[in-house]
Amino acid sequence: MRKALRPRAGLMSPWLLASLLLIAAPAYCKTPAAPARAPAAQPAAAHPPGTAIASAHSLSTQAGLEIVRQGGNAFDAAIAVSSTLSVVEPISSGIGGGGFFLLHDAKTGRDVFLDARETAPAAATPAAYLDAKGELNRDRATNGPWSAGIPGLPAALVHLAQKYGKLPLKTSLAPAIRIAREGFEVYPRLEKGYGSRREVMERYRGTREVFLADGSPPKAGEILKQPDLARTLELLAAKGYDGFYRGDVGAKLLAAVKEEGGQWKPEELSGYKVVEREPLRLKYRGWDIVTAPPPSSGGVAMAEILQILEGWDISKLDPAHRTHIIAEAMRRAYRDRTIYLGDPDFVKMPLARLTSRDYAAGLRATIHPEKATPSDLLSGQPAPLEDDETTHFSIIDAQGNRVSATQTVNLLYGSGMVAPGTGVLLNNEMDDFALRPGTPNAFGVMGFAANAPEPGKRMLSSMTPSFLESKDKVIAVGAPGGSRIITQVMLAVLAYDAGLAPQQVAAQPRIHHQWMPDAISAEAGALDADTVAKLQAMGHKVNAGESTWGNLQTVMWDKAANTLSGGTDPRNPVGQADVLSSRP
Ligand code: GLY
């Protein structure tokens, strides 16, 4: 197979150049976080020289570092970062949503995948989402109480503090409580996102109380205060699990869902549990990759893609063939995602087969070196692509603990519904189920029986928080972007493998293929005109330069140089990667 495609001379896309020639990051890159340097390079340092955090907002990155200065470890910092993101990025995630926290505990050497995905209430049967004609009721699937699963994020924060942190929740939640009460400056993405969800959000009394508090929608530059959310976080800090899932907040959440016509049973809220799962592990060239198992589809899809790609030395392919091969690998992995994956507590999945090298070799053999495989040979139907939402943060601390966490309320501002008196914006994660099997969801990805809703079941996700480790590098990485999360993280693996620095990895232009719709999406600068023409001649539809996506956040410990550095996605101007040196 290695010989099937020979390297050819040709114009290189900036994407390929960035990956292969280690050029400086594009002009729109932010300054990379200053590395914390040891006085002299060590062959392989035992501990990082400080703490590195990358997140989608400078306030959340600084909240994490504030907690580290107070004696906290990466897990305490993760509570601070996560809860602060819930305050300053309601467009992407919140304590009314869920997430996945991939943890590495340096003391035990153990990797844990903390699953805080939302669960389906019993009333949310497939039939509940069909209209009179038997079609998917999109409004119900994406807006208001029926679109919301039982939130998981608050339980994750409590679990992290009790099992992995060094500090009480009262300390690690303090920055988020302060920022919720005192307010933060609205930035353009929040204002724009509100504009696109305004009609839905203003249906709900609780949402109007937060976002129309001064009579008009939030505008960039204004200060947004969330006193109810501050009080809810205080109750979580004081009472732990009961502060959210039971008592006053729990009662208000149940009442709000009922008032708006939804159905959550009290025991569904009070019985929510996080699950600790074994992460999925794979090897790619010299990298050990620890990543997300189901109910995320991310690890399985990434394993398929990378193991298919191992059949080529992709650095030696010309841009068109390299993109062709990557897109074909993506196409096949996304098809399997759609057909097979769901919540492991409810469905049996052929995981050993899907993640095996033999299976990847079989898929590789179906890739024509010069021709696109039409996706409809595998059945399906086209659907639109998605917006950006969700959020990711990455942390490595001075003990070597790591957190790679992706959290979400699903689409922009989730369900649009805030439960009055709580400041809690509920997710619309129910749309990640295959509510009507075979019908694409808001991300254009379909699902079948494995991902049909059932009481207590977790909806399939694309969130792919990951660790990469080589002989001398330790990396935490992840991204938001709905179905485009998996391909962003996979492209980050290729970029790190090509020797890029974290900021270059965060900045590199991206491509994506998800089987359905049958097209390669490419950010501006990812593919030049010649490459697009060659891909079209192979039978690919290419949507080049229509949009950008993602918000990748990554940190790296270079053990050989004993430096820490971070990369924050320049597509999001308010993100920040920063390093706190532990050396005098
Ligand atoms: N809601 C996006 C995801 O979980 O993949």
Image (cartoon, rainbow, N blue to C red):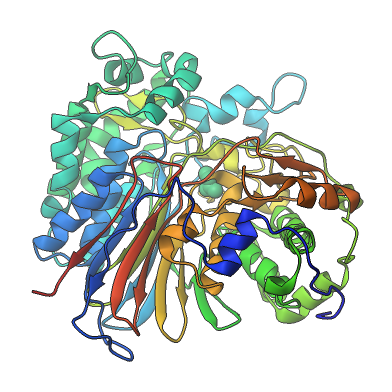
Could you tell whether 327 is left or right of 219 in the image?
right
Which residue occupies 47% across, 82% down? 470
Classify residue 177 by image quadrant.
Answer: top left
User: Looking at the figure, which quarter contains the N terminus?
Assistant: bottom right
- The residue located at (57%, 51%) in the rendering is 509
- In this view, the residue in front, 40 or 150, is 40
Res. 125 image quadrant: top right
Write down the quadrant of residue 373 in the picture: bottom right
Q: Residue furthest bottom?
A: 43
Horizontal relation, residue 515 to residue 245: left or right: right
Check the image and report above or below for 188 versus 584.
above
Residue 119: % across, % down: 48, 47
Name the residue nearer the viewer: 231 or 273. Answer: 231
Which residue is drawn at the image coordinates 76% and 56% (left, top)? 331
Is residue 483 at all visible to an observer of this figure? yes
Q: Is residue 229 above or below residue 399?
A: above
Residue 142 place in picture, x, y as percent: 55, 29
